Amino acid sequence: MSNSLLGVAQVKEASITNHFSALPSYDQRAWAREALHARYEDRLVDKFGYRQLVTYVPNKSEPIHNWFDYKEGFSKKLVEGLLVEFDARPDELVLDPFCGCGTTPLTCQQLGYPAVGVDILEVAVFAAQVKLRTDYEPHLMESKINQLLATPFREPESTFSDIRIIPRAFTPQAMQDILFLKEAILSEPEESIRDFLLLGLVSILEEVSCTSKDGQFLRLVKRKSLR
Ligand SMILES: C[S@@+](CC[C@H](N)C(=O)[O-])C[C@H]1O[C@@H](n2cnc3c(N)ncnc32)[C@H](O)[C@@H]1O
């Protein structure tokens, strides 16, 4: 890792489903949002120039940022713009307490600012950690990818967790392929290579499923398969 080592702290989800009834209701959340808004109203400024950047879309053409399509994410260009606007110095620590899959820490790392990111979503934290590593050897990674893709299919030993949406989201063939690839990846002894390949697999799950994320919901779409 470089000097501008960026930590991504993880706030564990703490089995949120078991505490559903303890979560605030919609009305309570709306009330809290309004109270916050009122408290900080004098500091809020509309910046319409950032409108196109408060989205993940511009990251699709940014190397490393585009390793994981995170619809809730913001763009590298937004972070770059804010660093300039706030006149951030390279010795100041940048904090993104809701960093998603790491756009802020990664942009800061690329520009030489120290930064810390936090997110509650485990998969986002994993994606951020994989993207923030700087010790990849491109030739080695390429040969590992080719090796994985050339591995002959064998029946997976593992199964999916018993989650109701899974059999609706994937064809039986796609499920077998995902498990086979996952097992092949997990047999890789080198952690950085393993995590890199695992993120690659996770990043294509939506593409090979018959679902598409639509706001907070999953929409059923035409089935696709890996083979
Ligand atoms: C709009 S996205 C963040 C985008 C990110 N700042 C970027 O630049 O790509 C909001 C994030 O907040 C996270 N989040 C929601 N509630 C949280 C909490 N209580 N603690 C930490 N992260 C949380 C979500 O998982 C989501 O990744």
Image (cartoon, rainbow, N blue to C red):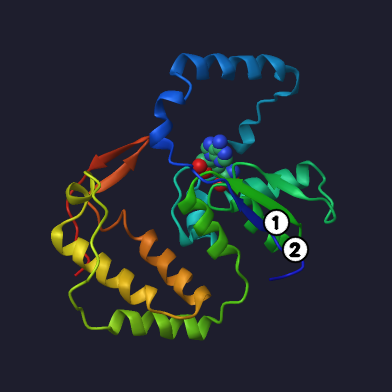
Q: Secondary structure at mark 2?
A: loop
Residue 37 is left or right of residue 124, and the answer is right
Q: Secondary structure at mark 1?
A: helix
Q: Position of residue 143 (x, y in %)?
A: 42, 86
Q: Position of residue 33 (x, y in %)?
A: 58, 19
Of the residues shown, which amino acid type is indicated by label 2? Ser
Left or right: residue 26 versus residue 166 is right
Using the image, tell me which numbered label, if any, was put on residue 108: 1
Who is closer to the viewer here, 211 or 58?
Answer: 211
Q: Residue furthest front?
A: 18
Q: Where is 90 relative to 158, above or below?
A: above
Report the Cα–Cα distance between label 2 and label 1.
Answer: 8 Å
| The quarter of the picture showing ligand 1 | top right
Which mark is first along the chain, 1 or 2?
Answer: 2
In this rendering, position of residue 105 left or right of residue 86: left
Asked whether residue 49 is in view, the answer is yes
Q: Nearer the viewer, residue 136 or 88?
A: 136
The x, y position of residue 76, in whole percent, is 61, 52
Among the 4 quarters of the image, the one containing residue 129: bottom right
- Quarter holding the C terminus? bottom left
Q: Amino acid at mark 1?
A: Cys
Disc 2 versus disc 1: nearer the observer = 2
Residue shown at 41% from the left, 67% from the top: 198
Sort mark 1 into few (<14), some (14-19) or many (20+) by Cα contacts within 10 Å. many
Check residue 4 in the rendering and tell me which mark sits there, or answer none: 2
Badge count: 2
